[in-house]
Amino acid sequence: MHKLLTYFIMVALLSGCQTADDALTTSSTPVAVTGPAASAIAGDMASRLAEQIGPAGATTTIKMEKDTSEFAVALEAALKGWGYTVVTDGKVANDVKPVELAYAIDGFDGQVLARLSTPSIALGRAYTPTAAGAAPASPLSIMQRN
């Protein structure tokens, strides 16, 4: 009986192993989101970020890397529309502690995965691009960091 139990445990452990040939592959690639889709995704993600980090105030500054992609421009405009001060040149007053914001856009199986990340929170959501913009294809994923 003991040998049989040991056999089942070993089979269970080994069944989780994969060789290089069995590895899962994905078709996730960076994608350029343009036009109405960029605006729709940026607007939705900016509003979700505002819900999580609180309303913009006189001291709320968001620091982003300088980027000229349509999504980056749309995200900056959407954040400013929510009342945030957005800095892309890295120049912040000495008395201001900005919220550093990183973002990523990836394509996967005909959808777009948008992610925003600050030191305290990460948001992610999948979108389906449409002729008029983009529609959410998944619930909002929220990860809070301590």
Image (spheres, rainbow, N blue to C red):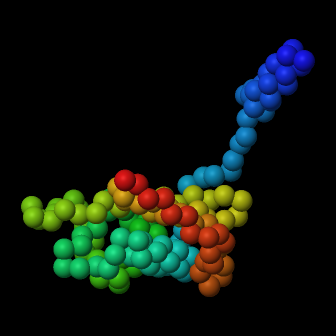
Left/right of residue 40 with respect to residue 54 in the rendered view: right
Q: Position of residue 92 (x, y in %)?
A: 16, 63
Decide which of 135, 58 is in the foreground and name it: 58
Q: Position of residue 130 (x, y in %)?
A: 66, 79
Furthest-top residue in this view: 3
| Image height of 35 relative to 23, above or below | below
Q: Residue at x 10, y 64 (%)?
A: 95
Q: Quadrant of residue 60?
A: bottom left
Q: Residue at x 53, y 74 (%)?
A: 41
Q: Residue at x 62, y 59 (%)?
A: 107
Residue 53 visible to the viewer = yes
Decide which of 112, 14 is in the foreground and name it: 14
Q: Quadrant of residue 17?
A: top right
Q: Residue at x 28, y 79 (%)?
A: 56
| Image height of 91 relative to 58, above or below | above
Decide which of 136, 128 is in the foreground and name it: 136
Residue 76 visible to the viewer = no
Left/right of residue 118 with respect to residue 143 in the rendered view: left
Left/right of residue 24 with respect to residue 35 in the rendered view: right
- Which quadrant does the N terminus fall into? top right
Furthest-front residue in this view: 1
| Image height of 124 relative to 13, above or below | below
Q: Position of residue 37 (x, y in %)?
A: 56, 76
Q: Position of residue 110 (x, y in %)?
A: 70, 64
Count all numbered tags in the image, as a single digit. 0
